[in-house]
Every structure is written in structure tokens, then in C-alpha cells.
Image: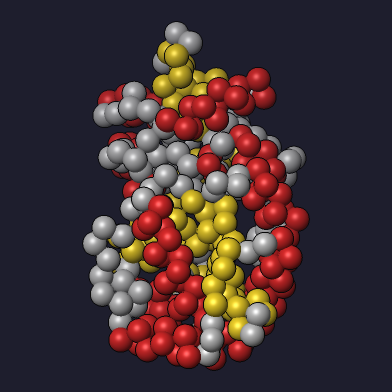
Amino acid sequence: MLVRAYTEADAERWDAFCAEAYMATFLHTRRFLSYHGTRFRDLSVVLEHKGDWWGILPAAQHTEDPGCVVSHPGITYGGLLHQGKLRGQRMLDAFDMLGAYYKTDGMERFLYKPVPYIYHRAPAQDDLYALFRSQAVRTRCDISCTIDLDGRLPASQRRKRALKKADKAGARVAIADTGQIELLWQVLEENLQRKHGAAPVHSLSEITGLAERFPGNIEFVVGLLNNQVEAGVVLFQTPLTCHAQYIAASQCANEAALLDKVFEYSISAAKDSGARYFDFGISNEDQGRVLNQGLFSFKSEFGGGGVVHEFYEIDLN
């Protein structure tokens, strides 16, 4: 087995490999990563044996720490992706080789973001064991709320009352058309600015461009009051998990409990599509050190529980 740098000539084979890798999602594909353009210095690698690909690692240089390689700074999770050939000792060997490769490239630290198990199509946490053996330090841990659609916990009475409130207010839910996506983004921008003084990670043009690239993976669901878009979610669909990437609600939507209607629709649609999990996303601030308990409680009351997103760092020296 050897480690070599990814090249643009590998793009088609890379994406085909992701389609069969046990823990890969569309976020790992070059088709998705390429939307970043030149924002990152790419340090992705291929692990191969006699021309046979055993694993791939999407990675790039940290934008604020040139001595750190991250898998991957442009997506929620990274990870060493494989189709079953990096198990046990081979995974240990792979981490040793990756460390040596990046150290030779001048890197001092390796920041690794494992793929949470809810995205795994088969048990594949050998990388977590390899991190332990590599003396990696967990530097951050976020908590998301996820519903197991095969065994959903009961929704709280508060959520049931809120759903009735939304119905009484005449709330409707729909898959967004082009014009409604723009209106949803206005609600999202106003919501983030009002609550956090922040802006969405993706601009409107970026998220619509990604949706055009991945029409089967990115979906916009809107909640309407008096035929006006007042709330909604952007859903990222993967083979096992439907993930709420963005959640937005205006003040009048909050008063009418419109998000309850949007989420119940989305959860039901995810189950009907054959998904195993519905993931609401994290409820953390300050690199995981602060939990927004109110937000986490709201999500968990739909019948979910905690799933962690971990961040590990290996000292390559």
C-alpha cells in the first residue's frame, strides 16, 4: 500500500469510489468539493495497492494554520473512506503512512473529523481505534440530535400541541420552487442576523448551484402562512440519513409553531424514502464548549437523541 497525492485526473474515479465506500456521502465527492474553487490548498490523497484503490482521504490545508492538514475544512466531516479493505491492522498501517506522508510535506498537525456512524452503510469505525493508537487528542465534540426512524421515540406533548397550533393557524408545507428558495434564504439570513449576528455559510447562489449539481441530494422544504414563505429547512439527503443543513423561521413563524409542521412533514417524508435517520444538526457554539440547551430540547422533543460529531488532532512530530 502506498499514499499518493490526488490529481484532477482522478476525479471521476474518486466519485465512483465514494458511491461504494461504506461511510462516504455526496459531500466527499470531487463534484461537491470543487465548488470551493481555490479557497483551500488541496491535500487529498489516494491509498492504493498495485493500482487498486484501498482508500481515499479528502483533505486540505487549514486556512489559518498552514502547518495543519484537515480532513476536510470545507465539509462537516471528512474521514478516511474505504470499501472494506482498510480494517483492523490495515487501518493502523494507513494512519502511520498518512502521518509520515504529511510530515514529509511539512505538516505538523493532522486534524481528523470522523464520519458519524449515522452515515455508515456498514460498521466501519476502525479509524476511531487507529486514532487511539496514534495518540490522537479529541479537541472538539459537538452534539447533534437524531431520530432513528426505525424506532422513533415518542414526541413530547409540547410538540404535539405545537403541531395542532400550526394546523389551526392554517400552516402549509411544500417543496420549494425557485422563487420560494430565494424567499426562504431571506428568512434564513434575517434569522441568523437577528439571533447571532451571522450569515449562512453558503450564499444563495452557492446553495442553488449545489442543488443543481445534486438534485437528488439537496431539497428545500418551506412552511407557508397566508401563502407567504415564513419558515423552512434545507435537507441534505444521503443513503441512510436525511440531515437538516439549514433551519429558518421568521418571528411570525415562531408564534404559529410553523417549524413543527415543517419538521413533521420532513420526518415523515424521510421515513417514506427509506432513510434510517433524520438528523437535526448540532446545537453547539464556541467549538462545542457551549450547548444551546433550548435548541437541543426542541429538537429532541420530536423523538430523537444525541449523536456526537468528533474532532481529533494528531501531532505529526
Judged from this view, the residue extending furthest toward the top is 50
Rendered location of residue 254, percent (x, y): 54, 86
Rendered location of residue 258, percent (x, y): 52, 81
- Seen at 34% across and 40% down, the residue is 121
Front residue (pair 269, 259) = 269
The relative height of residue 195 versus residue 15 in the rendered view (above or below) is below
Position of 8 with respect to 221 (left or right) is right
Front residue (pair 280, 75) = 280
Rendered location of residue 237, percent (x, y): 49, 51
Position of 41 with respect to 23 (left or right) is right
From this viewpoint, is residue 271 visible?
yes
Q: Quadrant of the N terminus?
A: top left
Q: Which of the 4 image quarters holds residue 179?
A: bottom right
The relative height of residue 306 versus residue 237 in the rendered view (above or below) is below
- Seen at 41% across and 79% down, the residue is 298
Rendered location of residue 139, percent (x, y): 44, 55
Q: Which of the 4 image quarters holds residue 13?
A: top right
Front residue (pair 140, 184) = 184
The relative height of residue 287 versus residue 64 in the rendered view (above or below) is below
